[in-house]
Image (cartoon, grey):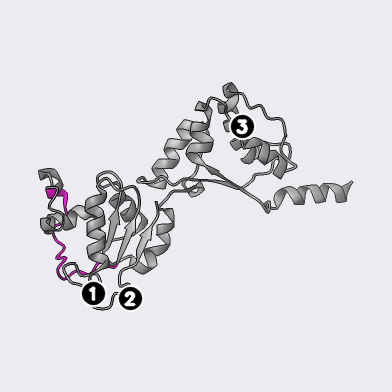
Amino acid sequence: MFLRTLHTTTARSLPPKYGFAFDIDGVLIKVSSLKHPPRFALASISRASPHLPARVSCTRATMYSQRHAAIQLLNGENPSGRRIPWLLLTNGGGITEDKKAEQLSKKLGVHISPQQLVLSHSPMKALIPTFENTPVLVVGGAGHSCREVAERYGFRRVIQPNDILGWQPAIWPFRELSEKERAEAKSHFDFAHERIGAIMVFHDSRDWGRDMQVMIDILRSQNGIIGTVKRDTSVQDVPLYFSN
């Protein structure tokens, strides 16, 4: 009896060798609005873990409760009291993980940690050691949302397309900046001498024509200096990171 109790206690204390990753919108948020909702992921969770119950209903009326119950089961509210690692994935972005976690916690009715979220641009954090103090062009998102996210990650010299357009409107003459946009553009950069070290597309662009033109000009430049033309087109001077 002692050996059996010791074995059970040890098994519960050890972290499981498996975990779960959920898509946010298609699985946890919008699935309840489908006309014929699919069997929720709780069934898969039950099959993968012998510690969790296997009863699952797939009526639309119970989708919210199942969604909530599945997360609670993973958080340790199961017969074994064992916590199962899980995280949420999405190709959405334009917001910090902290704010997204707060939104989802309210919507789903359970606490979600920012460390349990992987947004489209979350992997960009790995680039901080390389580009922390280097000017980088960040593309996408509404207004300055992605600039704020990038700066929150630790990039100290974040540039957006409107900054370049404010410096040289002829780069994209099909759209004039508003007075507000011109006032918000970072005018202290001299892009004729300032090297752009990398291009990072964080989220969906709100003006693909403008942004594509700016990105192409940088990619075709000599060592990231806007207005120059690279001599050796077989070598890419400026890396492009595309997250969405």
Which residues lie in the magenta part? 182-197
* Residue under the image location 75 percent in, 50 percent down: 11
The numbered mark at residue 91 is none
Camera-side residue of 69 and 29: 29
Camera-side residue of 220 and 144: 220
Q: Is residue 185 magenta?
A: yes
Alpha carbons under labels 3 and 2: distance apart = 53 Å
Kind of residue at badge 3: Ala
Classed neighbour count for the residue bearing mark 2: other residues with Cα under 10 Å, few (<14), some (14–19), many (≥20):
few
Residue that badge 3 annotates: 69
Alpha carbons under labels 1 and 3: distance apart = 57 Å
User: Tag 2 or tag 3, which sits nearer the N-term?
Assistant: 3
Residue that badge 1 annotates: 230
Asked whether the residues under the numbered discs 2 and 1 touch, taking CB atoms below 8 Å apart as contact, a structural biologist would say yes
To which quarter of the image does residue 44 belong?
top right
Q: Does the magenta stretch include residue 1?
A: no
Kind of residue at badge 2: Val
Residue that badge 2 annotates: 235
